[in-house]
Image (spheres, rainbow, N blue to C red):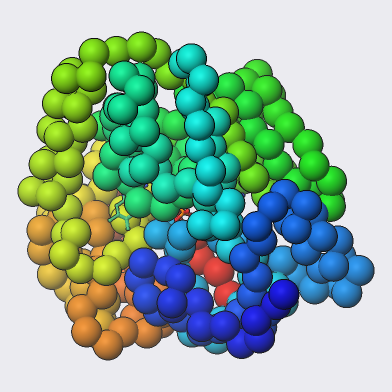
Amino acid sequence: MFIKNYPLSKVTSLGVGGPADLFIKPASAEEVAKTQRYAAEHNLPLTVIGYGTNLLIRDGGVRGIVMQIAEPLACARVEGTVLSAQAGCLMGSLSKLALRHGLSGLEFAVGIPGGVGGAAFMNAGAYGGEIGPLIKSVQFVQNGKIGSWCRDEFYYSYRSSRLQEEKDKAVVTAVELELTPGKHSDIGQKMHHFQSQRRSKQPLEYPSAGSTFKRPPGRYVGPLIEQAGLKGLRIGGAEVSTKHAGFIIKTGEAKARDFLDLIAKIQETILAEFEVSLEPEIRIFGED
Ligand SMILES: Cc1cc2nc3c(=O)[nH]c(=O)nc-3n(C[C@H](O)[C@H](O)[C@H](O)COP(=O)(O)OP(=O)(O)OC[C@H]3O[C@@H](n4cnc5c(N)ncnc54)[C@H](O)[C@@H]3O)c2cc1C
């Protein structure tokens, strides 16, 4: 069942941007397939989102259908060393499930917000870990049909995966992750350490979409922005975090336009000062 004119600011961590013409949250792979077929038959663009923690939605919103893969598709189970999860499972919950089963591999993910479908798409990672190498299989729906890739068919690289390269959008509905047995106390300690690192270094007290830019080869984004004197720079309600310059945070009322202008300003300055071209890590959807 579609909801008309749904405000996407409600389903993104930044909380800005306009509405989706039509919004739907499928509860099964079959419903995902049906939605894809409906979009194709009615010639409507179809945009897929997870928990919106890596998204900037433009102020004019998104035309056509926005399909959110979230809670209705969020069952997970562990058999031996394999963790099977539907795409709407939160990464934080999955790392805690792995901990309960004494399985190592997902420690890096304990503080990454968003779902495992979005994480597979982005090849999300932190503290030297990433989801790509853990993937045993990916179930997806493409062109209205259910399919799957095994480990060797799912290629990935830094913040990128096969899912970003498919010409016809493949919507992840479930993944299997291969983990390794570990000592409960070691896994727990590692998670605790990563969480405290995050809390001390990242501006978690403000809305953001995580790191704004991908790391350019051999450089770190935060220090580059800081050296360029842009830390704390503000346009409207968007601000380069004073705690971690790699994050742009929302302070008070903000428009997507504020974020887009600030991103452009940072890119121009870093290119001019260091001849480094910064590519957004966040995904930008919709119309101005
Ligand atoms: C405070 C904060 C900290 C963060 N820290 C990290 C970090 O340490 N490491 C990191 O990698 N990221 C980090 N992020 C970014 C973000 O959390 C991850 O990229 C996350 O994996 C995105 O998941 P999501 O469900 O929110 O996806 P969304 O943001 O909704 O979508 C991201 C992309 O994935 C696609 N997508 C989503 N679900 C599916 C699906 N089921 N099938 C196909 N495509 C899909 C969307 O089309 C979109 O292009 C952080 C974000 C915040 C706000």
Q: Quadrant of the N terminus?
A: bottom right
Horizontal and vertical percent position of residue 230: 17, 65
Q: Quadrant of residue 172?
A: top right
Residue, far right: 41
Horizontal side of residue 260 vs 40, given as left or right: left
Looking at the picture, does residue 156 appear above or below residue 243? above
* Residue at x 27% of width, y 87% of height: 253
Judging depth in this view, the residue of 155 and 142 nearest the camera is 142
Judging depth in this view, the residue of 157 and 252 nearest the camera is 252
* Residue at x 70% of width, y 42% of height: 140
Horizontal side of residue 69 vs 36, given as left or right: left
Q: Quadrant of residue 234?
A: bottom left
Horizontal side of residue 282 vs 203, given as left or right: right
* Residue at x 75% of width, y 58% of height: 31
Q: Quadrant of residue 62?
A: bottom right
Q: How many marks?
A: 0
* Residue at x 50% of width, y 77% of height: 8
Looking at the picture, does residue 59 appear above or below residue 201? below
Horizontal and vertical percent position of residue 263: 35, 68
Horizontal side of residue 179 vs 27, given as left or right: left
Horizontal and vertical percent position of residue 190: 18, 26
Q: Could one spot residue 125 in this view of the protein?
A: no
Judging depth in this view, the residue of 277 and 158 nearest the camera is 158
Looking at the picture, does residue 44 appear above or below residue 118? below
Looking at the picture, does residue 221 appear above or below residue 134? below
Q: Quadrant of the C terminus?
A: bottom right
